[in-house]
Amino acid sequence: MLAGAEGRHATTVRRLSPGERVDLTDGSGTAAECVVAAARPGQLELTVLARRSWPAPAPRLTVVQAIPKGDRGELAVETMTEVGVDVVVPWAAERCVAVWRGERAARGAAKWRSAALQAAKQSRRYWFPEVTDLAATAAVADRVRDASLALVLDPEAADPLMTLASAAGPAGDIVLVVGPEGGISPAEHDVLAQAGAKGARLGPTVLRASSAGAVAAALVMTAVRRWA
């Protein structure tokens, strides 16, 4: 039986009817392939045809996303989720125009998580992404130290992103750091470099902070053959 918010969406928005296929997932790699046996307002009766499990994607990709202005943060999370990013870390970078403090930080993280959940369902992911709480630069540096490869997007960097990403192994964590519209401060660059991050040039043009993460993630996925 599928009820609650998902049941209402299935019956009133998607208007699923008996005989149609439905896949259910727990967001942690397990899914049930089902067919609709009966449909009532807000409820579906499902017959399970098969159960399947998918291994966690590797290498795992984390994007540290400096907080963009307005609703661009939700847009960034949505597109990164569709691409396949595994972890999104909201970052309180020095030059962020938007500032999350107190209750605003909790609301902002909740909006990002909601955007990730909806995008994961739309893109039919079996592993849903994690959206962490707001991180300061020191916490970002800790993630960089623990990563097998950490790259900071920098339009002035000498090395192309694809060249650096191609050197990544098949396991471990890759961390991409996306700065704010005003760029990453020199002090932040120093902290991340000391932690082991390398500067990476995304391409010949400069993208918005809200779109750079998704484009960079797609290139990394290609380089490590997760999109092969």
Image (cartoon, rainbow, N blue to C red):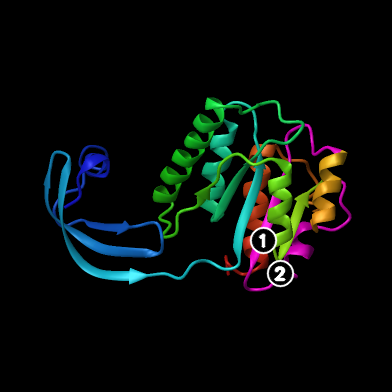
Dot 1 surroundings within 10 Å: few (below 14), some, or many (20 or more)?
many
Which residue occupies the foreground of this view, 97 or 135? 135
* Amino acid found under the numbered disc labelled 1: Ile
Observer able to see residue 155: no
Total numbered badges shown on the rendered structure = 2
Q: In the rendered structure, which segment of residues is drawn in magenta?
A: 156-185
Q: Residue at x 55, y 45 (%)?
A: 132
Which residue occupies the foreground of this view, 150 or 211? 150
Q: Give whichever of discs 1 and 2 has the lower sequence position.
A: 2
Point out residue 101 in the picture as x, y percentages from the top left corner.
61, 27
Q: Residue at x 64, y 50 (%)?
A: 63
Q: CA distance from mark 1 to mark 2?
A: 8 Å
Q: Are marks 1 and 2 in contact (CB under 8 Å)?
A: yes
* Amino acid found under the numbered disc labelled 2: Ala
Q: In the rendering, which numbered label is found on residue 168? A: 2
In the image, residue 60 sits, relative to residue 119, either above or below, namely below
- Our reading of the magenta stretch's main secondary structure is loop
Q: Say which residue label 1 marks.
A: 174
In the image, residue 150 sits, relative to residue 42, either above or below, namely below
Q: Is residue 181 left or right of residue 120?
A: right
- Identify the image quadrant of residue 51: bottom left
- Identify the image quadrant of residue 220: bottom right
In the image, residue 103 sits, relative to residue 109, either above or below, namely above
Point out residue 188 in the picture as x, y percentages from the top left corner.
81, 42
Q: Is residue 87 magenta?
A: no
Q: Residue at x 65, y 68 (%)?
A: 224
